Amino acid sequence: MSRNAELGRLVGHWGVDAAAIDGLDGLLDGMRATYARVEALAAEHVAAAPATMTWDLEKIAGADPHHAWMFRATDRAPAPASGPLAGLRLAVKDSIAVADVPMTAGSAFLREGFLPRRSAVAVERALDAGATLAGTAVCEDLCYSGSSFTSATGPVLNPYDPERAAGGSTSGCGVLLATDQADIALGTDLGGSVRNPAAWCGVAALKATFALVPYAGALATEFSMDHLGLMARRAGDLARLLDAVAGPCAEDPRQAGIGALRGSAADIGGDISGLRIGIVRDGFGWPDRSDPRVDAVVRAAADALARLCAGAEEISIGLHRHGRDIHVPISCEGGLATVFEQNSQGSNHAGAYDPDLARAFGEALATNIDALPLNGAVSLIAGTVLRRETKSRVMALAQALRVKLRAQYDAALRRFDLLVMPTVPMPPHRLPKGPLAPAAHQKLAFEMHDNNCVTNLTGHPALSVPCGMVDGLPVGMLLIGRHLDDHLLLRTAHRFESEIFAPPPPPGGQGGRHDAKQGVSA
């Protein structure tokens, strides 16, 4: 496209009078010269970050039995190490940077993948604390799904039933933990992406208080809702991982104003007898989505937990039922800006930017747009169209509703120490046998988000803990607490898994899991 034609297209896009083009070429040339000078200055003054370590990894790309590994350590025995995470094998979602390991975000869109120069801050902290890198795990295509059927390397199979979804978008990590191929994992969570697979794979996952765990080095989607998520089989390992990776980070602008985490992993065996539990009725009985057996298992688990605490009371949070609707305009228009217009960098923040990722993503948009997954294309097109039609007014209204929603949660958590509801309203759904029509594809990818996406809006810590079984498939119970009370949730989960329920290993599962307690089932 000629320079004049490109200017004409942009003028038409913005509705500017065509006369505005006159004389613009010279001004643009001056700006291009400035850009060139900045690039030259950066070459002189901004050193490329060196790789932190050379890994002994093999590319699996979903060729393992559950299609869960992207890159796997060739020596899978933990290396001798010291520190609070010593002896624990760490899996990392394929949308979080690991130095010198190609990152594809589960997609063919980035072709051979983006090669990070350094690891994400949370990865570095976990390894510094003694964890051993087990490898990187398959995730959903550009993370645009809560199921496990969209990855470019093939569907990730549920460890309890290979015909069913493992949950997503941090799908591979859930499977690797359930099958004892990893002990701890790092994923991302914009609407439930570590908690969905935790519920369906029978493991635990914490979406910590917003910004408590630095997001720097993970693929960004929407800066005000992006969370790094922590996963493990046991609450105690989650608590150790949280202590290792949480805390201030100058590279993450999300952390402005964040306070200090209360408690530590040392509190995991502490007393919970005085805790007051609120059972949020709005999280049960979703029309056309909730399975009554899941509701029954979670209610029974909540009642059992209440007997260990100071009792439970059923409550309502008025806007909870509308959380999914509030989430959509914010994630849609925020994702349009951050992912597609700013090449997953965001803007107007003083945190870390990744010029290599920006170039790789921008080049993929320019040369490989046909590989954009359906849900990514929907986000791009719907975000563009709806932002133009509504002038971002509806997104702004959603942000105002978000403030009200958080206030309602804060009010409930002044009365209660933690809130309970199902993590996901239904058991794992069956994986599709072939291509789906767009509407069916979208439904299957996002039908599980009702309860989880709410705390991405409010920023409260939310922990999914296995609480029972339905037809041999795990069910997750969601515990929600006050900001920075993450360890209180972990302490509660530890007591629950120790005295009430721990899931049986999956069929053919490997050893090393805690003893199953079959206290809750349907």
Image: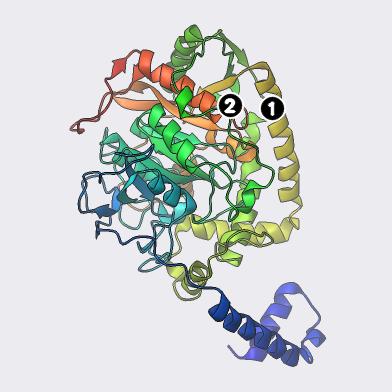
Kind of residue sitting beneath label 2: Gly
Decide which of 382, 415 is in the foreground and name it. 415
Disc 1 target residue: 410
Q: Position of residue 122 (x, y in %)?
A: 47, 48
Above/below status of 294 relative to 107: above
**Circle 2: is it few (<14), some (14-19), or many (20+) Cα within 10 Å?**
many
Dot 2: what SS? Answer: loop
Horizontal side of residue 247 vs 66, given as left or right: right
**Residue 165 seen in this snapshot:** no
Residue 317, labelled with which disc?
A: none
The quadrant the N terminus occupies is: bottom right
Q: Amino acid at mark 1?
A: Asp
Residue 455: horizontal and vertical position, in percent? 59, 35
Query: 383 or 237, which lies in front?
Result: 237
x 63%, y 30%: residue = 320
Q: CA distance from mark 1 to mark 2?
A: 9 Å
Q: Residue furthest front?
A: 82
Counting every numbered tag in the picture gives: 2
Question: What residue lies at 31% left-to-right and 40% top-to-bottom?
Answer: 175
Work out whether mark 1 precedes mark 2 in sequence or the reverse, and give the earlier one.
Answer: 1
Q: Please identify the quadrant where the C terminus is shown.
A: top left
473 left or right of 25? Answer: left
Crowd around label 1: few <14 · some 14–19 · many ≥20 (10 Å) = some
Q: Is residue 217 toward the left or the right of residue 260 in the image?
A: left
User: Which residue, given by chain and number where applicable, does mark 2 sit on?
Assistant: 481
Work out whether residue 46 or residue 227 is closer to the camera in this orientation and state it: 46
